Structures are given as C-alpha cells and as structure tokens.
Amino acid sequence: MNLNRPLTSADLLQLKRWNTPTIYNGWEQITKRNPAADAFNLEETRDFMPQMGPMVGYAVTVVIEPSHRQHRETNPNGWQEYRRYVASRPGPKIVVIQDLDQPRVIGSFWGEVNSNTHRALGCVGTITDGAIRDLDEMNNAGFKALARRLCVGHAFAHPVRWDCEVEVFGRTVRPGDLIHADKHGFMVVTPEEQPHLLEAARFMDTNECSTVIAAARDAAGRSLEETCAALDRAAAEFSANVKTKFKRAGEW
C-alpha cells in the first residue's frame, strides 16, 4: 500500500465541502482512465446517514463471511490482528468491507460497538456491500455508512482477511485508495490522480456557476429565443474554459 499521500488534511477538508458528483466532474478532467464508469460504484448503494454529508478518507479493507462459524475457530486472534492493522494506517480512514455472503446477507459487521471502536481507531465511516445495524447508535457515534441494507443480527461476523483488494458494489478498492462518498454513491481515486483533484473540482464547480448555471438563472424576463441564445453562449464559454484549463484529460 502506498502511504505517500499528496493531499494535506486541509485538502481533504475542502474536498469534503463538495458532493461526490462535483468531485467526479473534476476527476474526469485529469484522469487517464475511462471517465465513463471507471471510478465509481456500478451497483446501487444506500447512504444511511445522508445528514452527515460527504465523507472522505483512505481505504482500509476487510473481507467477512458472517454465515460461517469456522472463521472464528481458524483464526481466534483475528479481531486483535485486524484492529492493529486498522490502527497502524494513517487517517482519516474508511473501512471498505466485502461480504462473501452475497447476494444473501446473513449478519452485520457493524453496530454500536464496532462503530465506536473504529472511531477510536481513526475511521470516519464504512462502505459495505453487506448490512449494518444499530442505526441510531451509529449515528450517535458519528460513523457514516453506505451499505446494502439493514439487518437485526451479527451472526458470525469475523475478519476473514484484511489489507487486501476487495470488490464492493461492482468497484475494486485497494488499501490506501482515496474515497469520496455521499448519498449518490462513492468514487475511488488512485494515488496518481490525487494531487490535482481539489484544484480540478474547484475549477469545474466555479466554471459551471459562472457560465451555464448563471445563464439559466438569469432567464427571467427573456424571450424563449433570447434564453436559448444565452444558454448557447454560456455552453460555449464553459467548453472553452475547460479546454483552456485542461489541454487534454490527464495532462496539466
């Protein structure tokens, strides 16, 4: 895992001020990947704490299989070893969990105890393709969760393996990847894409507000023809600004 992080704590706080679609708008201008669908979740997920706004952090990963008791017997020290792994990584951290019981969810890794425990270890939230429980208590702990659904029990939720590549909601996540997540879903930003992410997102947001959105909001009192002409001019200005700022995707 790459621990050389190009973003400061101040950068992360500023990234948290925008929603995930706005971060995507900046990301697609600087990435060398396919911006159509190469960074965000491809399956639907649910934000159970939308009132908390976006969360930003670095992935720590773990695989679980709550339907199988033998994982506890195979590695009775799994919880202690897993917690030390999480504690050893710099934060802020987002716990990304792949649940092997898919598509049937048997039990929840998360609840009041684990959310408070992980907050103490520097984690701000989780993305799990399984379930969560103790929703009010997780809210009280200030621990954000994107998950597939709620459930009642924990079954045999036990760390099976950790610090490994996982796949959740159709997206591969590696330890140390930067994650931005909110009620729309989540996106995964590789280390080489991070240095200019904040600047790109800020630019794209400003560009939208000063061109196409401003033209649309100023439509009152204009004829339909005048409104369409103003929108055409604004769209052209928006595109010209992007071309000037970004010579081509991935190059600065």
Image (cartoon, grey):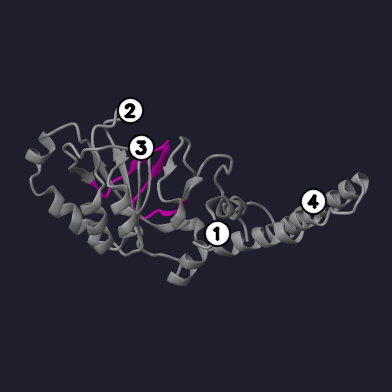
Q: Amino acid at mark 2?
A: Pro
Of marks 3 and 2, the one in the foreground: 3
Q: Quadrant of residue 83?
A: bottom left
How far separated are the C-alphas under marks 1 and 2? 32 Å
Q: Residues within 10 Å of mark 1 (few under 14, many from 20)?
A: some
Extreme residue toward the front, this view: 136
Tell me: residue 183, above or below residue 143: above
Q: Quadrant of residue 246?
A: bottom right
Circles 1, 2 touching at the beta carbon (< 8 Å):
no
Q: Which residue is mark 1?
A: 18
Disc assigned to residue 235: 4
Question: Marks 4/1: CA distance?
Answer: 22 Å
Mark 4 or 1, closer to the camera:
1
- Whether 83 is among the magenta residues is no
Q: Position of residue 2 (x, y in %)?
A: 36, 58
Q: Earlier in the sequence, mark 3 or mark 4?
A: 3
Give the CA distance from mark 3 to mark 4.
40 Å
Residue closest to the eye, 109 or 238: 109
User: Residue 174: which disc?
Assistant: none
The x and y percentages for residue 114 are: 23, 52
Q: Earlier in the sequence, mark 1 or mark 2?
A: 1
Q: Are marks 3 and 4 in contact (CB under 8 Å)?
A: no
Q: Is residue 171 highlighted in magenta? A: yes
Q: Amino acid at mark 4?
A: Ala
Task: Please name the amino acid that badge 1 sits on.
Answer: Trp
| In this picture, residue 54 sits left or right of residue 205 | left
Q: Which residue is mark 3?
A: 149
Of callouts 4 and 1, the N-terminal one: 1
